[in-house]
Amino acid sequence: MSILALRGITKSYAGNSILKGVRLEAGDGEFIALVGPSGCGKSTLLRIVAGLDHADNGEIVIGGRNVSSLAAADRNIAMVFQSYALYPHLTAGQNIAVPLAMRRLTAVQRFPFIGNFLPGQRRIRADIQRQVREMASSLKIDHLLDRKPGQMSGGQRQRVALARAMVRRPSVFLMDEPLSNLDANLRVHARGEIVELHRRAGVPTLYVTHDQSEALSMADRVAVMIGGTLLQLAPPQDIYEDPSHIEVARFLGQPRINVLETRLDASGLVRFGALTLAAESAPPAETPVLIGIRPEFVRLSARPDGILSARIERTEFLGSEVIIHARLDAIGETIVARMTPAEAGGLSVGMPVSVEIEPDRAMLFAPAGERLPAKTVAVASVPEKAYG
Amino acid sequence: MTAHSLTLGRMLRFGLLSLGALLFLAPYIFMISTAGKAQSEIFSSSLSLIPEQWSFAENFTKALSRVSMPTLLMNGVIVCALIFLVQVVVAIPCAYAMAKLKFRAARIMMVLVMLGLLVPIHATALPLYVAFDRLSVLNSYTALVAPFSISVFAIFLFLQFFRAIPDDLIHAARLDGMSEAGIVARVIVPNAWPAITAFAIFSVVAHWNDLFWPLVVVSNQDFATPPLGLLYFRAAEAGDDYGALMAATLIITLPLVAAFLVAQKRFVEGITMTGLKG
């Protein structure tokens, strides 16, 4: 059952179309990462969901209710901002208490001085304090409650911002790159914490990030957005292994996927080195196509087999793996391989090598970017050894 | 060598600054000196800063007894406080709207604010006088306060300051359930103290010292502000008794000097704590 549904959201600023009909559905307790390069419209989308901005078209449904025309405050959405946006003049405890006070106390009860004398006010405030302390202890920030944001580190502010967002049990949780202001070590640690918090709260979460490893490691489903269009929404492994569009394949994966331009031959086959692919729904012969192959499925070996030869241009040693850039002799393109240090043992810059591509892992894309279903039809004999 | 030249440079700088300070303070020092002199000594041909005969007590007694000094000071406080209060209450929501809300008239309003900065009170004095006369509000606090209630300078100052407040802070407040008025009261104002203090100095100094407008709309001593009272004092009571006049001047400038010294400290604090990073 979907708790949050976005239907055909469009938005343009000054004639520039930022969002082009975005559709998305999030189930109960689902964690969706919205990922894309900067400027793809993901933050705009998040702001529209939050009610801080208005869509030109489309509707936002939360828990079966169309909230498109509701103000931000009435949507019961909580958001964690990239800058955390804590109130600088309030302590951490007061910051966390704000959303509760705004909802539970009436305007008169909140009024300075006068409010203090109204009946019931004291009991509600005590209750709010109790909830703030509970929230703080679950995030291990009890000791920070009396400090102001200016006296806290980035990681501490981020926790306070999380606490402020979670304390009022929102129906949808939005996060706008909440980890991008943290240093690398803390960021990896904080990922685990956010996932754990999300699991405990069970609230559907829309998490915007430009960091693909955050998206892949944290989310139940990853939504890749490019140029205002949501290209694919799928679980991390599916979207990585089976991208529906060349841009999705390019965006996810580090180092980037190898994309080689080639053509379908007269019989509707694509030949590349030892690889032969057949497009299932055969497009016209002789049309240009793109082959995508991830670096981990490319093997370079020092023993030239004469089928696909290349010369090593650069190697990057990363500890557990080696990234090797090699220029293909036939077409002059660079192909990137990711290998274990053991496999890359004898390889050095300038060395001529043969390139082998793991056949079942090659993907075929139309020039415009859509995935073309394809299957490998014939494989030239590949030495067993290359596959370890 | 470097230490030596540095001290020389510093000495030069200190010398120049001291000279400048002395130049600016000279009239005030002279005023204090004159307030302590007897009538005969003020008009003697010799010029000295230290009075030969100390007449402070005499002059201050005259200044305090001949004119109702408490009324003048009280009027000054009431008028300045009212003007400042109304200016802030009007300017902060206005500047917030112009800085953070999107609406079509924002551009035109900005132009109007800039135009408003160019129009001096003297240009509008006559029509305002006529209007207040028709309304029979001359000789009242209303006449003294009303023309200054909307300060385009305040709007401009706050506008610049509010633009620097991160949008996310306001978005967070909206999501937390605050109304726009709530945002102004609970988020903007608590973070705008440096700007408010800075504006308070400008506003209070200008209106405490203002002679022009009170002279136009007030003819009754009961509503006289300090500078106007001083004028009456000179015209009606003191004549050429400059000793008493200077004593009276000293009395009415003292609150401002004291207030400025107190606020200046806060003002500097304010500037150093503008780190509005969430």
Image (cartoon, rainbow, N blue to C red):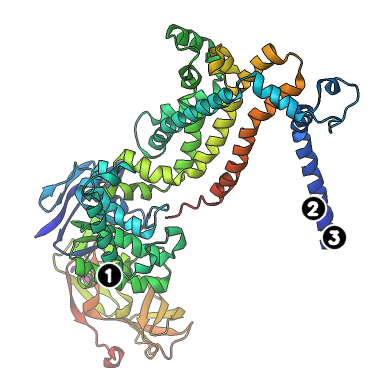
Tag 2, which secondary structure? helix
| Front position in the image: A49 or B136 | B136
- Gap in angstroms between the C-alphas marked 2 and 3: 10 Å
Residue A267 among magenta residues: yes
The answer, for residue B28, to whether it is visible in the render is yes
Which amino acid is tagged 2? Arg
For discs 2 and 1, the disc positioned in front in the rendered view:
1
| In contact (CB < 8 Å): disc 2 and disc 1 | no
Judged left or right of residue B111, residue A76 is left
- Gap in angstroms between the C-alphas marked 1 and 3: 61 Å
Residue B246 among magenta residues: no
Counting other residues with Cα less than 10 Å from the Cα at mark 1, is it few (<14), some (14-19), or many (20 or more)?
Answer: few
Pointer 3 indicates a residue of which chain? Answer: B
Instruction: Return the x and y of residue B64 as percentages of the image width and height.
Output: 65, 24
Magenta span: helix, strand or loop, mainly?
loop
- A80 over B33 or under it: above or below: below
| Front position in the image: A341 or B20 | B20
Instruction: Return the x and y of residue A274 as percentages of the image width and height.
Output: 27, 80
Residue positioned 34% across, 33% down in the render = B103
Residue assigned mark 3: B4
Judged left or right of residue A370, residue B234 is right
Residue assigned mark 2: B10
Residue assigned mark 1: A138
Counting other residues with Cα less than 10 Å from the Cα at mark 2, is it few (<14), some (14-19), or many (20 or more)?
Answer: few
Tag 3, which secondary structure? helix
Over which residues does the magenta segment extend? A265-270
| In contact (CB < 8 Å): disc 1 and disc 3 | no
Q: Earlier in the sequence, mark 2 or mark 3?
A: 3
Most extreme residue toward the right, as rendered?
B46
